[in-house]
Image (spheres, rainbow, N blue to C red):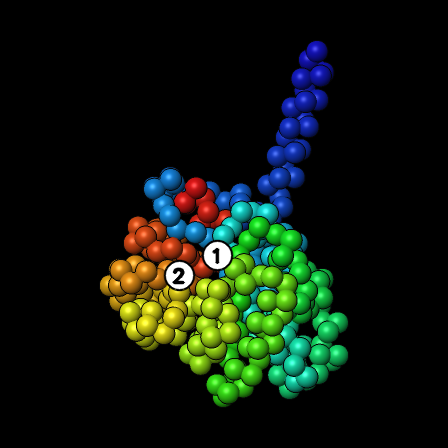
């Protein structure tokens, strides 16, 4: 009996050592009880570039989308850029592997590997995976040097989304006002929010916008815009909030969504 107890203690100790020696996943990190708000909160979680801050994932990857859905987040934000031959790919930066995306054909970059070993996804691949999942897709069109060029790609995006019957599941955001207006015109069933941070909500409401999606610094300087948006029936999303105290502050201000690189932390706060 004594031998059995010692053996079990040894196994327990070894499991503890293994568990502590590995890199901590975001879900395992503790949130101070004073920052947990719980059932009082209506704020929803949007994973910035997907749930990449976890094992086996990478920014703007299909894995990040899958993991965001599995974690139960409201949405997964992702970035769309077009290649020189008009193929929409999921990538935040202008360049990948030294290639300026808008200047090269898709064939030059289609086998590019992300940090998790996954191949650079196209928009079509991302939408197909998203259609299988219970999560909102927050599509940001990355802007180009001329607004005319932004607008030329929107028809491609909207046609692809409509063809898959995902108008309600895909929400559009952009820094380009002309691009946002074109999304509103071509897909009135979809939610469109402006990222620029320089226009009062009431003015955007008149143009058909569903919400504002402003940088945290903007809404800290102009907290009255949160209330203004609510009064005119618009949603409020704030980005990119990674500081826990700032998350707490915006939750208390009753914003609808927070976009963050630490979505698991935020979900623990609002659960």
Q: Is residue 132 above or below residue 9?
A: below
* Residue 193 pos. (x, y %): 42, 68
Going from N to C along the chain, the mark reached first, 2 or 1, is 1
* Residue 78 pos. (x, y %): 55, 65
Residue at the spot 65% in from the left edge and 53% down from the top edge: 132
Element class at badge 1: strand
Q: Is residue 10 above or below residue 141?
A: above
Q: Which of the two residues, 180 or 260, is positioned nearer the viewer here?
A: 180
Residue labelled with disc 1: 46
225 displayed left or right of 153: left
Residue at the spot 50% in from the left edge and 87% down from the top edge: 148
Q: Quadrant of the N terminus?
A: top right
From this viewpoint, is residue 249 visible? no
* Whether label 2 touches label 1, CB < 8 Å: yes
Q: Residue furthest left?
A: 224
Which quadrant holds residue 8? Answer: top right
Element class at badge 2: strand
Q: Quadrant of the C terminus?
A: top left
* Residue 187 pos. (x, y %): 50, 70
Residue labelled with disc 2: 237
Q: Residues within 10 Å of mark 1 (few under 14, many from 20)?
A: many
From this viewpoint, is residue 60 visible? yes
Residue at the spot 30% in from the left edge and 59% down from the top edge: 230
Q: Residue furthest top?
A: 1
90 displayed left or right of 182: right
Residue at the spot 67% in from the left edge and 33% down from the top edge: 14
Residues under labels 2 and 1: Cα distance?
9 Å
* Residue 194 pos. (x, y %): 41, 71
Q: Residues within 10 Å of mark 2 (few under 14, many from 20)?
A: many
């Amino acid at each position: 009996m004594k031998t059995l107890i010692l053996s079990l203690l040894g196994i327990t100790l070894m499991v503890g050592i293994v568990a502590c020696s590995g890199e901590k996943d975001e879900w395992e990190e503790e949130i101070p009880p004073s920052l947990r708000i719980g059932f009082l909160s209506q704020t929803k979680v949007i994973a910035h570039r997907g749930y990449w801050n976890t094992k086996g994932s990478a920014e703007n990857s299909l894995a990040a989308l899958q993991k965001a859905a599995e974690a139960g987040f409201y949405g997964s934000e992702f970035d769309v850029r077009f290649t020189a031959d008009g193929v929409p790919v999921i990538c935040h930066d202008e360049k990948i592997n030294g290639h300026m995306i808008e200047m090269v054909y898709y064939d030059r970059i289609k086998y590019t590997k992300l940090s998790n070993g996954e191949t650079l996804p196209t928009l079509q691949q991302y939408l197909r995976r998203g259609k299988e999942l219970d999560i909102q897709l927050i599509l940001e069109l990355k802007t180009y040097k001329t607004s005319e060029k932004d607008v030329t790609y929107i028809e491609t995006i909207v046609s692809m989304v409509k063809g898959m019957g995902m108008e309600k599941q895909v929400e559009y955001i952009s820094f380009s006002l002309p691009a946002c207006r074109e999304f509103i015109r071509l897909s009135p069933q979809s939610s469109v929010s402006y990222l620029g941070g320089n226009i009062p909500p009431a003015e955007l409401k008149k143009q058909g916008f569903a919400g504002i999606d402003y940088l945290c610094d903007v809404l800290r300087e102009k907290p009255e815009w949160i209330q203004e948006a609510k009064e005119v029936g618009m949603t409020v999303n704030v980005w990119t909030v990674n500081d826990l105290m700032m998350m707490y502050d915006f939750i208390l201000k009753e914003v609808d969504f927070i976009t963050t690189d630490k979505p698991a932390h935020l979900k623990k706060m609002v659960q």
